[in-house]
Amino acid sequence: MGGAVVDDGPPGVKAPDGGWGWAVLVGCFVITGFSYAFPKAVSVFFKELIREFDVGYSDTAWISSILLAMLYGTGPLCSVLVNRFGCRPVMMVGGIFASLGMILASFAKSIIHIYLCTGVITGLGLALNFQPSLIMLNRYFSEKRPLANGLAAAGSPVALCCLSPLGQVLQYQYGWRGGFLILGGMLLNCCACGALMRPLLPPKKPLELEENAPKAEDKPQAKKKLLDFSVFRDRGFVIYTTAASIMVLGLFVPPVFVVNYAKGLGYEDTKSALLLTILGFVDMFARPAAGLIAGMKWVRPRCVYLFAFSMLFNGVTDLVGSQADNYTGLVVFCIFFGISYGMVGALQFEVLMAIVGTEKFSSAIGLVLLMEAIAVLVGPPGAGRLLDATHKYMYVFLLAGCEVALSAIVMALGNFFCIKKKQEDVGSKMEMAVTPAEKVGLNGGVEGEGDDEGEEESKGKENGHPTALKGGEDVVMVEEVGENSQL
């Protein structure tokens, strides 16, 4: 990379929780908006694409599905590129790819061309922007991270409120080809957002200390892993990945199909597209609100259960919304779906950050997105095939609701039983490793030790942050106690 600085989060650099972090937040806000709103916004062009290429609903649904699959499935590739080159250059190259894909799609001669251009090329470009922006946000915020995540996640509904009606207008004025061309130009803004991702640097040392310090060439440097698979030893990470993979099977289905649901009931195109605007408007306020709630002192240690509740809320909303048979019913559905969808969007990466920490987040998010990619690739097309077979949107929404509700159950029960049981097992092993005589010594037999331990414990309680129990730590803790016993 020559003289470029790789933003690998140098140790000892404290997250500023503000300052240039707010500029990073703005960039992340825009990138999140493009990444999540685009697969839904292009659905307003589906009816024209069906007429143009003489295909079915399931065929056009593949466009959104491939976009999301690229956004998710290229996660490990993004992790490797970020760990190798840094966030800023990866994002700027991704912005060029995202724009190029939509421009090429405007000249498509078949639905396959749109799959390759809009789905693969634009999807890859958005992926190269989305993941690095979240990594940088995690490095710039710590205490205010839940709020920052909520505000950044609000970019999705804001973009959806703008892109959905804009896409409808562009379709009427310029056709779907002209609309794709203009949207491709808009995606060049991703390059500007990438330029905002300034790497965090360690504080400068005084000149005397710098002269006396050993040179960097003399220090043995450990080779940094481009992709850290050790996160799979963390039980909390495995539960999160499993639940999230089930969730995305149905999470993105209603926003993709709700416009055509209204059209199927006989409502005009503009009125039908307004449903996405309503959903996005509610979602816009739900995400920062969820971030504020998650940042509360008594909620943050239990954030995973708030996340499980938001998934259950979303699933139940889909189940009830499947019975809507008029425009009013669809509006009510979009309001409640916007609330629950906003909660999920604001909390999903905050929970992951709390589980794995800053150091492993770049690898963890890539692996999570890869696991979710398979489900994303199956979800909307599977729902489209179900619609082609039944010609009823009710079954599509019922299936989506069941999938999301199941993910909530896996998340809540997995954390309640597996993580809690592991903590109890660690405690019992430690008690078995310490003899009664040693317990007396630890409780106050050795002068100063009890006071030091009390101070450590009080500091931990005063900190107020959630502590994630990592895989394998119980063994280390028991071995340490065993060594103390021998001493």
Image (cartoon, rainbow, N blue to C red):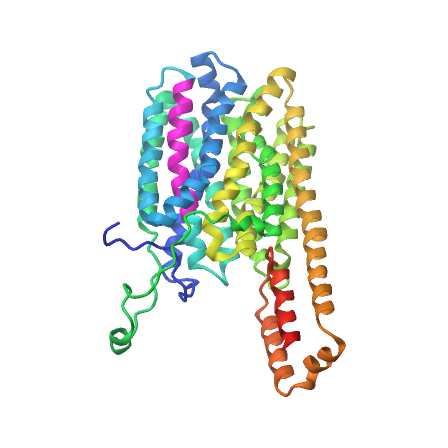
Q: Is residue 78 above or below residue 147?
A: above
Q: Is residue 140 left or right of residue 349?
A: left
Percent of width and height locating residue 191: 31, 43
User: Can the viewer see residue 159?
Assistant: no
Quadrant in the rendering for residue 70: top left
Q: Is residue 115 above or below residue 368?
A: above
Q: Is residue 385 left or right of residue 224?
A: right
Residue placed most toward the observer, 64 or 11: 11
Residue farthest toward the bottom in the current orientation of the protein: 447
Is most of the magenta stretch helix, strand or loop? helix
User: Can the viewer see residue 186?
Assistant: yes
Percent of width and height locating residue 279: 55, 37
The magenta span reads 112-132
Residue placed most toward the observer, 6 or 274: 6
Quadrant in the rendering for residue 302: bottom right
User: Residue at 48% across / 33% down in the picture?
Assistant: 68
Q: Is residue 439 above or below residue 398?
A: below
Percent of width and height locating residue 124: 39, 35
Quadrant in the rendering for residue 321: top right
- The answer to if 370 sits in the magenta stretch is no
Quadrant into which the C terminus falls: bottom right
